[in-house]
Amino acid sequence: METIQQDMLLETAWKHFSDPALAPLLRSLLDKSPYDRDAIKRLIELDPSSAKPYVIRAVCDPKEAMPLEDVGGLPEATLPEVDSCLGDLLKSAPPRPNDHRWTTRAILAARFASPAILPAVRAGWIDPAQDGPVLALLLRYAPAEATAKIESTSGNRSNTFYTINKVFESRHATFPQQLLTLLRHDLTEGSDEKAITAAHELSQGGEPQDRALLEQRLERLHRGGFLSSDAMTKQQNALENDLMSSLRNANAWSLTDAELEELGRYCTSETCRNYAKPREDRVGKDTSKL
């Protein structure tokens, strides 16, 4: 098969040709090109058990850093086989802040490694720019330490949580109770800024019952009697919009269109009301996540 035909099959036309009978072809492609990202992703979809050794080889590659998006679908919760190779690659601090290869491998460690990798990762963790993937790993194996670090972080935590969310979504896991306790406190008792972050994170890595906390914070805001967004502070307006967005786009729960519409009855801004619209009303847009 020519390269261009292969690319078309594995990318644009895959949904039309996906079939378990293609697994041998994908294994053959990976035997020749171990870092073929499309081939390994499709083999995981078709035959995850036979994909496992190829995933281990790709994750351990000392030259290339395989993105989580291409291997995270493997159903195994952990791959202790990658502890040694990833540990060797992560124990030295990266040559520069935001080093792509170090970060990508640390994300893979957070997804697949066992607790045995912790000393190596701690040794290479010297800069706040590395916090996201390392905290994703610590939330798994040292959740109290990770939560304390997150709580002590000043300023915007969005970059850190972006990576944490990727790892936990790949694992199909909820956040540990220590982090959930912190986020619930920030949502119910914290400033508007903290509540915005906490609402989004609970909607992604929280539990179904956390939905009620978001609704209560929204109700508390609306009890202020604001008749329009102009009567709100900029931060209050952002809180209203973000609470509605988090309620609508949650991974931790789902709302019916009727429930969304009811929540939006007291919205003061067009943006908030937009998040409350039934999904079928959003013509021409992806309505599953808005």
Image (cartoon, helix red, strand yellow):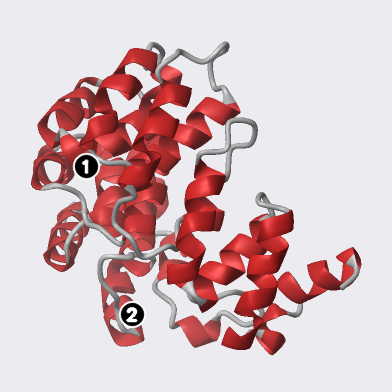
Mark number displayed over residue 110: none
Determine crowd level at label 1: few under 14, some 14-19, many 20+ residues with C-alpha closer than 10 A.
some
From this view, report whether residue 46 is shown above or below residue 129: below
On the image, the x and y values in percent for residue 10 come to 72, 71
At mark 1, the secondary structure is helix
Q: Residue at (60%, 61%) from the top-left corner?
A: 40
Q: Which residue is mark 1?
A: 140
Give the labeled residue for mark 2.
261
Query: What's the CA distance linking mark 1 and mark 2?
Result: 37 Å
The foreground one among 63 and 242 is: 63
Residue 159 visible in the current orientation: no
Q: Amino acid at mark 2?
A: Glu
Going 48% across and 75% down the picture, which residue do you hit?
288
Quarter of the figure with residue 178 = top left
Residue 17 visible? The answer is yes
Residue 135: x and y in percent read 29, 32
